[in-house]
Image: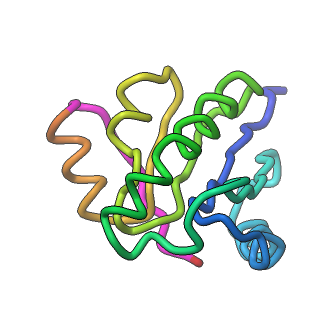
Amino acid sequence: MAMGKKILYIKPSAYDTMNAEIKEYLEKYKDSDTEVDVVSMPRGPKHLEYLYYQSIAYHEILKAVKKAEKDGYHAAVIGCFDDPALYPGARNLRNHVCDRSRGSRHAYRGRTGRQLFNHSGP
């Protein structure tokens, strides 16, 4: 029997009050042999509504993506429609990195020729 997949959902803001709810939501839709974990950034802005705040968050997001790869995750989802750190993360890692935005999926495929999946949940 094939081993299951591990997916890390990265909430790029620096608060964890919704992590349990996001995990509960994702658990409903994952395959039975898929493990889903949710993390927030340990430091940084509380929201990413402005490019300035996104730029502050980049470093922690990329560290989380790199750690996910090192920890054996098969994919990382950056849970923000503004795509913070999506392209640098996807370009520099072996595993899949995506965000929740449909536009990002098409842009990524156009730039890299690789498929990107879309998640449109919390």
At a point 30% along the width and 33% down the height, the residue shown is 114
Residue depicted at 44% across the width and 56% down the height:
99
- Rendering coords of residue 36 (x, y %): 76, 53
Vertical comparison of 53 with 6: above or below: below
Q: Which residues are magenta?
A: 112-121
Residue 49 is left or right of residue 2, and the answer is left
Query: For residue 115, what is the image quadrant?
Result: top left
Q: Position of residue 32 (x, y in %)?
A: 81, 54
Q: Position of residue 1 (x, y in %)?
A: 84, 26
Q: How many numbered markers are drawn?
A: 0
Q: Does 46 sit above or below residue 94?
A: below
**x 55%, y 76%: residue:** 121
Q: Position of residue 6 (x, y in %)?
A: 74, 40
Q: For the point 50% across and 20% down, which residue is it?
A: 94
Q: Is residue 90 magenta?
A: no
Which residue reaches farthest left? Answer: 110
Q: Quadrant of the C terminus?
A: bottom right
Residue closest to the eye, 11 or 31? 11
In the rendered view, how is the structure colored?
Answer: rainbow
Magenta span dominant secondary structure: loop
Quadrant assignment, res 7: top right
